[in-house]
Image: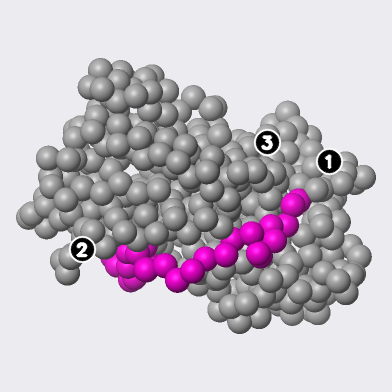
Amino acid sequence: MGKITKFVKSKVCNSTNRAFPLIVNHHTMASFQIQIISETLIKPSSPTPPSLKQHQLSDYDKTMHHMYTPVAFLYTSHGHGIPSTDEVSQLLKNSLSKTLKHYSHFAGRLVGDSHVDCNDMGVKLLEVRVRCPMAEVLKRPNTDAQDLVYPKGLPWSMAKEDILVVAQISYFDCGGIAVSADISHKIVDVASITTFMNDWAAMARNSSYKPSPQIVSPTILKMDDVPATAEDDNMKENICQSRRFLFHDSKIAELKALAVNSGAENPTRVELVTAILHKCAVTASTAALGSFMPNILLLAVNLRSIISPPLAKTSIGNMSSCYAISATHENRMKFPLLAGELRRSKIKLFQKYGKQLNESELLFLNSTDKAHESQKLSDGDNFDCFIFSSLCRSPFYEVDFGWGRPVLVYVPNCPFKNTFFLIDTPTQDGIEALVTLEENVMQIFENDEGLLAFASLIKDS
C-alpha cells in the first residue's frame, strides 16, 4: 500500500530550542503521526578511568561491519501501570547513564578499524510521540512497526558516523511504550545485546543494581588470515522482500517426527525450522532461476559455552561464529537429510572443537571450515549463500523496565537477501521466522505448499 510522508514544523524543541519535525504517515487503513520530542546524548554516570580509555577490538570484531543491529521491545499499559511520559523519560535516561558506567566503550567513538575511544561522548537517545495506539502496530508488524519504534532508516544500515549505540523511546497515545536499540555489530553479537538490555532494564527497576558484564579481551580471539566467504555477497544491493512466518510448537513436533523417522538424531527445534526454511528457499530459488544452484547454509552459534574453558554468559563482544553445510546436488535438498546434517555438523563442532581447542583455535578452525565449504562449492562457479541467525531461548522477553515483560520483541525487516532470523513467539509456544529473499524468489517461496503445511504467513490485519 502506498505511503506518503510529509514534514511540518513542530513547536516541540530540545534543550537547544531546535525545532523537530512532525512526520505524518498516511495509510489506506490507518494514519498516524510521529513527533520527535528530543534527541540527546546520554553519557556514563561517572567518567571512565584513564586505564579503560581505549577498548581494543579483537581480530573477530574487526571482521564485522560497522552496521546497526536492531532490536525493539514493546510494552502495553494494560495492568502494568506505566508511569507518566516525564517519569519514564527520567527513569530510562538515568538508568541508561548508570548502565553505561559499566559499558564505557558503548558510549565511546569508533576509531578506524582498531579500537574504540572510550571518551564518554555518549549514546544517542531519541524520544518520539506516536499519535496512534500500539494495537495498530501489533496488527501490522510488517509495515507500521518499523518506522514507529526505530529511527527511520537506521536498522541494518552501515553507520555513517562513529556513534556506536542509538536508542529510541516511543510513547504511544494509549500509554504503551517501545524501547529500541541499534548497536554496532563491531562491538556486539546477539548475546551481548541481550545482556546489555537486561542490565539496563534491571537498573531501571533497581537503581542500586550492579551490572557485571565481562568485556572480552581482544587477545582471546586471535585469527590468521582466513579466506573470504560468500556472506558479504548477500549484503549487496538487491530487490528483496521480507515475510514473517509462524511455526507453532505442534507443527515443529510434526517436523521432528518426520525427521526422526527418516534417521535424523534428535534435531532441535531451531534445526528443524532452519532445515524446512532452507529446503523451501532453495526450491523457490531453483524455480526462479530455472536450474539448481549449489549452496551453502551458515547457521550462527554462540561460542561462549562451547570453548574450553567456557566464557561467562555475560561476556560482551563478538563471540559468535557459524557452522556450515553445503549441497552440490539437488537430491541433497530433502528435509530429513538437511535436519540430520545440521545436527551432525553442530555435534562435530561441539565435540571435536570445543573439548580439544582453546578459544583462538576454535574460532580459526571454524572460520576455516566455513571458508573451505565456500571454496569447495565454488570452483569458479556461482553458488548461493543462506544465512540463519537464531534468537530463540535468548532472554529477550525478560527485559523488564518495571512494567512487566514486553508483549513483543520486534526485529525489523532485513534488507539483505537470503537472511533468516528465528525468534520465540511472545507466548513461547512457537518460532517466528523473519525471511528475506529476492523478490522473484519470495513470490514462489511464500506460496510453497510444503512450507505452508507447517507454517502460517503472518499478514498485516
Regarding mark 3 in the picture, which secondary structure is present there? helix
Q: Is residue 357 left or right of residue 331?
A: right
Quadrant including the N terminus: bottom left
Magenta stretch in the rendered image = 213-242
The residue under the point 73% across, 39% down is: 400
Tell which residue pokes out farthest to the front in this image. 356
Q: Give residue 287's position: percent from left, percent from top.
A: 11, 50
As measured in the structure, the alpha-carbon distance from the residue carrying label 3 to the one carrying label 2 is 43 Å
Q: Which residue is mark 1?
A: 205
The reply to whether residue 170 is visible in this rendering is no
Give the CA separation, mark 1 to mark 3. Answer: 12 Å
Residue type at numbered disc 2? Ser
Which quadrant would residue 427 be assigned to in this image? Answer: top right
Pick the front one: 436 or 88: 436
Q: How many marks?
A: 3
Location of the C terminus by quadrant is top left
Rendered location of residue 251, percent (x, y): 34, 23
Residue bearing the label numbered 2:
378
Camera-side residue of 372 and 337: 372
